Image: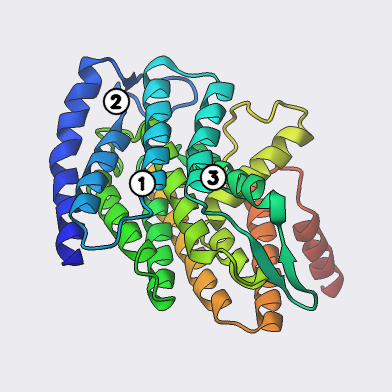
């Protein structure tokens, strides 16, 4: 039964995390406190390795057709290896990108998991043809990096991943997808086990080993669950992953505005800005969980809306994101066009 595979994945995770923690200290795969970091003590990384092992055991025992799983798993091995090496030796961005692209190629070329076409409202079918593979690779790499960038507080990336995976599983069950739903649930169980040790204050970090792997799996599962569909349905995974994707998008905008390299690090991500407003680390994590849940619920409603209803909901979502961005200063404290306009209107009414 599938439930046993899910429970075993969770149980193996509970056992594996302390083992991996000891292993990480033994090989010096640790994160030491630095200026940009919130933690004050040396902490083991490689937590993603425990997630990967427990997920692998759960998948091995899962009573589902795994005939198309090999390309996905091989890509996962590449991404895990990339993250593992980075956690120990601190790879340059170009080598990390190479690992991500190789993993994406396994899925798109070998596994033939791509976005081949979409049905655009008022236009008809739009076939991607030769662009199907490049677009799918861009999608996978974008999600991988979005989740990696938001992994800045204890429990943050893990919790967001669980919310995204549970939403993808729920959507897959409604679509009667016999592969995506079980895989997402088994992976969510593995992450939940890790989160017990990673929730603030964390005793272990997932590291790039975990962030890259989770981003990769979420990207692939969302690609499988929502490919060859309407333009509206294609937006569903974008909405589900709204927190990491919007944080990444505004980080790029912020760095371009300040004429900084896109790959440079800063302390202006969403979790940094919320903490600057006075929230504690745990409060910030829980608040972002709530945001992720709202995005996921919006994704559910969005998928069952009419074309006009979906467009209206999308505009409302974009407006809400803009207000939040301006309020917390995600692009910059001087960027407040809509809030300034609302203040002017309010003053005129007085």
Tell me, for residue 43, which label it has, or none: 2
Contact (Cβ within 8 Å) of mark 1 with mark 3: no
Report the mark closest to the observer, 2 or 3.
3
From the viewer's side, name the closer residue of 32 and 347.
32
All told, the count of numbered labels is 3
Q: Quadrant of the C terminus?
A: bottom right
Quadrant location of residue 229? bottom right
Residue highlighted by disc 1: 70
User: Who's the residue at 26% across and 52% down the image?
Assistant: 192
Tell me, for residue 261, which label it has, or none: none
Coordinates of residue 330 in the picture (x, y in percent): 64, 45
Rounded to the nearest angstrom, the CA distance separating label 2 from label 3 is 38 Å
Q: Is residue 82 above or below residue 1?
A: above
Report if residue 332 is visible in the image. no
From the viewer's side, name the closer residue of 268 and 236.
236
SS at mark 3?
Answer: helix
């Amino acid at each position: 039964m599938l439930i046993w595979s899910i429970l075993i994945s969770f149980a193996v995770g509970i056992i594996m995390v302390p083992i991996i923690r000891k292993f990480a200290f033994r090989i010096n795969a640790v994160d030491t406190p630095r200026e940009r970091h919130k933690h004050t003590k040396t902490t083991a990384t490689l937590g993603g390795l425990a997630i990967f092992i427990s997920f692998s055991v759960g998948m091995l025992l899962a009573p589902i057709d795994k005939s198309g799983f090999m390309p996905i798993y091989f890509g996962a091995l590449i991404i895990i290896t990339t993250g593992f090496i980075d956690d120990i030796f601190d790879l340059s961005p170009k080598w990390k990108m190479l690992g991500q692209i190789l993993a994406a190629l396994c899925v798109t070329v070998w596994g033939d998991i791509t976005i081949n076409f979409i049905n655009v409202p008022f236009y008809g079918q739009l076939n991607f043809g030769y662009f199907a593979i490049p677009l799918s690779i861009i999608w996978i790499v974008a999600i991988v990096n979005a989740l990696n960038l938001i992994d800045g507080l204890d429990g943050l990336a893990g919790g967001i991943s669980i919310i995204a995976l549970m939403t993808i599983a729920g959507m897959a069950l409604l679509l009667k997808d016999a592969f995506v739903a079980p895989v997402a649930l088994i992976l969510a169980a593995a992450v939940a086990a890790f989160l017990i040790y990673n929730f603030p204050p964390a005793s272990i970090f997932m590291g790039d080993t975990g962030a890259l792997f989770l981003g990769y799996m979420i990207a692939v599962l969302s690609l499988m669950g929502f490919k060859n569909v309407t333009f509206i349905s294609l937006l569903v995974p974008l909405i589900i992953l709204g927190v990491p994707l919007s944080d990444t998008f505004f980080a790029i905008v912020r760095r371009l505005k300040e004429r900084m390299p896109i790959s440079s690090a800063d302390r202006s991500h969403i979790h940094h800005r919320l903490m600057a407003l006075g929230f504690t680390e745990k409060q910030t994590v829980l608040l972002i969980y709530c945001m992720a849940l709202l995005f996921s619920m919006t994704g559910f409603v969005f998928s069952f809306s009419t074309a006009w209803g979906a467009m209206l909901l999308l505009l409302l979502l974009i407006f809400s994101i803009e207000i939040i961005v301006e309020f917390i200063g995600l692009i910059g404290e001087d960027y407040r066009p809509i809030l300034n306009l609302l203040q002017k209107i309010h003053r005129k009414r007085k």
